Image: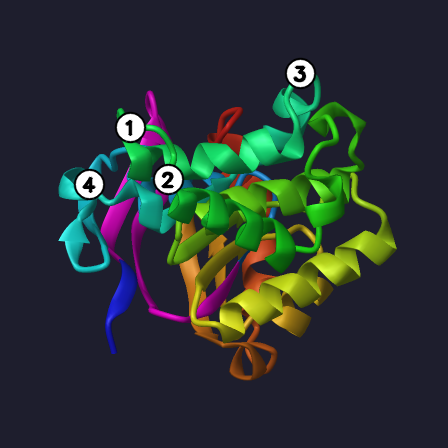
Amino acid sequence: MTHAITVENVSFAYDDQPVLKDVSLSIETGEFLGLIGPNGSGKTTLLKIMLGLQTPDAGTVELFGTPATEFTEGTRLGYVSQHSTDADAVMPVTVREVVKMGRYAHAGLWRLTADDHDAIEDALDTVGIADLADRRISRLSGGQRQRTYIARALASQADLLALDEPTVGVDADSVERFYDLLGELNDDGISIVLIEHDIGVVTEHADTIACLNGELYEHCETEAFLDTDALERAFSSARVVQGNAVAGGD
């Protein structure tokens, strides 16, 4: 099986404060991974390292078999960060304009083609927001904005979606619809890495779980994970790890 992401012996510190220690795991193509752990456990840092957005102090990362430092197919990666909805909420752009950004890497210096516009409309349809295409993103709910970012990733033809607490501030009904959408995308073959504070939601929807608190406590199929004590061990050591972490080390 081809690996979407391979992490080997990764360690990372902010200044002299250790955040990750000797973390190794691999994510198969088509896998839906839930990344869980207490606040300050290094989840966000690990996700950024997985995507090549940060460089580890030690260890290596590969994306689809290529070293992350040499990976040039950025359109294959769709990333929704913790604060993207807040940052973009005041932008004077429409939903379609945000989704269109996903095609610019394909178009380069040229104008968007008919195929590009088809990809944009298909992405809007897939996530169920075609009727909102001309609405300002600042007028959307949190759940609608998250669907917009997913559509942008789909328009870029992403093979991997990385989502960092995507449902913060989203109402319960929208959360359920959002995870139904992720399940459908995963069924279509898109790999997903999800950080989510609601552990019950993660274990309900993810195929595999990686439990982290500075070090990796467990990475296995969800059903098997529920029979381990990894969660208890990770959270029981949270005080020590959080004491060493700094802002942004989650």
Relative to 162, does residue 219 appear above or below in the rendering? below
Span highlighted in magenta in the image: 6-34
Task: Name the residue nearer the viewer: 188 or 44.
Answer: 188
For label 2, the crowd category at 10 Å Cα-Cα, with few meaning under 14, some 14 to 19 and many 20 or more, is few
Residue 73 badge: none
Label 2: element kind? loop
Q: Quadrant of residue 168?
A: top right
Circle 4: residue type: Thr
Residue 72 badge: 4
Q: Magenta: predominant secondary structure element?
A: strand
* Label 4 or label 1, whichever comes before in sequence order: 4
* Label 4 or label 2, whichever comes before in sequence order: 4
Q: Is 161 left, or right, of 54 in this rendering?
A: right
Label 1: element kind? loop
Task: Name the residue nearer the viewer: 180 or 48.
Answer: 180
Is any atom of residue 208 visible in this view? no
Circle 3: residue type: Pro
> CA–CA distance between discs 4 and 1?
19 Å
Relative to 232, does residue 70 appear above or below in the rendering? above
> CA–CA distance between discs 1 and 3?
24 Å
Q: Are marks 1 and 2 in contact (CB under 8 Å)?
A: yes
List x then y, in percent, for residue 135. Answer: 75, 31
For label 3, the crowd category at 10 Å Cα-Cα, with few meaning under 14, some 14 to 19 and many 20 or more, is few
> CA–CA distance between discs 4 and 3?
30 Å
Which residue corresponds to mark 2? Answer: 113
User: Is 41 covered by the magenta stretch?
Assistant: no
* Label 3 or label 2, whichever comes before in sequence order: 3
Circle 1: residue type: Trp
Which residue corresponds to mark 3? Answer: 92
Residue located 53% across and 24% down the image: 247
Which residue corresponds to mark 1? Answer: 110
